[in-house]
């Protein structure tokens, strides 16, 4: 059933499927892994140990979806719901599907300086795309397939750091090289790591695993406890 609920592509996600000889060996391995996780053996990751599900694919047995336009308010309500879920005796690993904002580098463009060089934000973006990631310029046929031809800068693919930002140069309308630092400043900003929508409304899932109970029973009990949020 792994293929029925595929995980989204995410460089920060990994899944390991371990096949044991018998049920006793499987349960012993799961208990040992859970003990290491609870002891803080892997603080950099959220590790979940569970058996493969036989039935309709359900990523998490307990899921409450919070919808609304304000992302910060979704977080605030989500934290309160998560705390209530964590207090239930049959839940564990209660958490928000997404939470902390992600730091990013952001270019603050000086439009006056850009205009003096005969450039526009679009022209600047095209040059930076070529230098940093590469850009398609044509296509060719290989057998029956169309293959894109991309042109990239010599150091394309490398992370944009403050040191690299100072050394980047672009061409103005006359073809002269201009330092990117003369046209923009690099600053750190924060953005949502992921934005999920349901019927065009933002939503946040609060999820948890269960122990010693059925999902329907735990969900019904939690549903009564979060009546104030509905």
Image: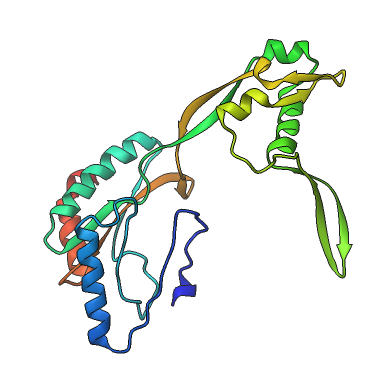
Above or below residue 55? Residue 79 is above
Image quadrant in which the N terminus is located: bottom left
Above or below residue 128? Residue 66 is below
Image side of residue 215 versus residue 113, left or right: left
- The image position of residue 215, as x and y in percent, is 23, 69
Q: How many marks?
A: 0
Pick the residue in front: 28 or 194: 28
Above or below residue 14? Residue 197 is above
- The image position of residue 192, as x and y in percent, is 45, 39
- The image position of residue 198, as x and y in percent, is 45, 51
Q: Which picture quadrant has residue 68?
A: top left
Residue lying at 15% horizontally and 60% vertically, measured from the top left: 221
Image side of residue 3 versus residue 81, left or right: right
Q: Which picture quadrant has residue 177?
A: top right
- The image position of residue 26, as x and y in percent, is 27, 81
Image side of residue 228 versus residue 19, left or right: left
Pick the residue in front: 139 or 60: 139
Residue lying at 69% horizontally and 27% vertically, measured from the top left: 168
Farthest residue to the bottom: give it. 22
Residue lying at 35% horizontally and 34% vertically, measured from the top left: 72
Q: Which picture quadrant has residue 131?
A: top right
């Amino acid at each position: 059933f792994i293929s029925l609920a595929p995980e989204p592509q995410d460089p920060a996600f990994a899944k390991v499927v371990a096949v044991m000889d018998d049920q006793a060996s499987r349960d012993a391995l799961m208990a040992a892994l859970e003990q290491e996780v609870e002891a803080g053996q892997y603080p950099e990751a959220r590790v979940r140990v569970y058996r493969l599900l036989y039935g309709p694919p359900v990523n998490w047995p307990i899921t409450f979806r919070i919808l609304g336009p304000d992302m910060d308010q979704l977080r605030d309500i989500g934290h309160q719901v998560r705390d209530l879920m964590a207090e239930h005796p049959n839940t564990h690993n209660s958490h928000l599907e997404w939470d902390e904002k992600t730091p990013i580098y952001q270019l603050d463009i000086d439009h006056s300086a850009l205009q003096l060089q005969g450039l526009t934000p679009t022209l600047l973006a095209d040059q930076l795309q070529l230098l940093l990631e590469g850009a398609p310029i044509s296509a060719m046929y290989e057998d029956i397939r169309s293959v894109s031809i991309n042109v990239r800068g010599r150091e394309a693919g490398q992370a944009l750091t403050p040191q690299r930002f100072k050394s980047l140069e672009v061409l103005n309308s006359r073809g002269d090289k201009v330092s990117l630092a003369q046209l923009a400043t690099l600053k750190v900003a924060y953005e949502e790591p992921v934005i999920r929508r349901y019927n065009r409304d933002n939503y946040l899932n609060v999820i948890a695993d269960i122990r010693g109970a059925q999902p329907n029973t735990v969900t019904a009990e939690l549903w009564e406890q979060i009546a104030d949020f509905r």
